[in-house]
Image (tube, grey):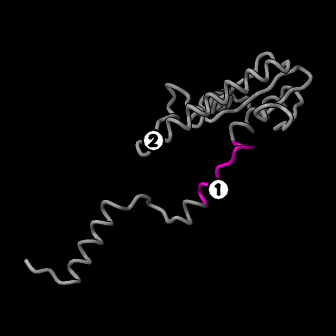
Amino acid sequence: MNLTNGAVEYVFREIERIFIVVDVVSPEKRSQMMAGISGKNTKPEIFVRKILHRMGYRFRLHKKDLPGKPDIVLPRYKIVIFVQGCFWHGHENCHLFRLPKSRTEFWEAKIVGNKARDEKVLMELSQLGYPQPQQILPCVSSFCETELRITGSS
């Protein structure tokens, strides 16, 4: 079978289209999407802050002088709150956490490292006099937000 240059190019383009394409968006768009992922002022964090403020509590945000830069600090009560992402902190048995199928080893190591860092930060905070640092997960806060809407307490 004799293939022309055009036919060979066509075959290679089809192979590349089917097998080699890794992403469905351009690298520029992917970069823009990843840049939009924020570690501060996330929807679950704002939701928790609104509830605390509505209840009359006053707090500080993202205190840099504490280990782990807690999302919310109630200095008067010596309470710190972390609003953790279910994916990034490996929340087991959660519908928001699923280990990616590509680069599994990388993601496992990343999430295990995050969990180890979380444990270290919690221990350091307890040594500084914050006896029970609280961790709130988005799956829990979204459930609470739904409950508040249903009961009309928003």
Pointer 2 residue:
100
Location of the N terminus by quadrant is bottom left
Q: Position of residue 152 (x, y in %)?
A: 70, 30
150 sits to left or right of 127: left
Q: Quadrant of residue 101?
A: top left
Examine the structure image and report whether residue 34 is included in the region drawn in magenta.
yes
Name, please, the residue furthest toward the top.
131
Q: Nearer the viewer, residue 118 or 55?
A: 118
Span colored in magenta? 32-42
Report the Cα–Cα distance between label 1 and label 2. 20 Å
* Point 73% across, 36% down: residue: 47
98 sits to left or right of 119: left
Pointer 1 residue:
35
Secondary structure beneath disc 2? Answer: loop
Is 51 located above or below residue 128 in the figure? below
Amino acid on which disc 1 is placed: Ala
Location of the C terminus by quadrant is top right
Is 96 located above or below residue 11 in the figure? above
Q: Quadrant of residue 147?
A: top right
Name, please, the residue furthest toward the left.
1
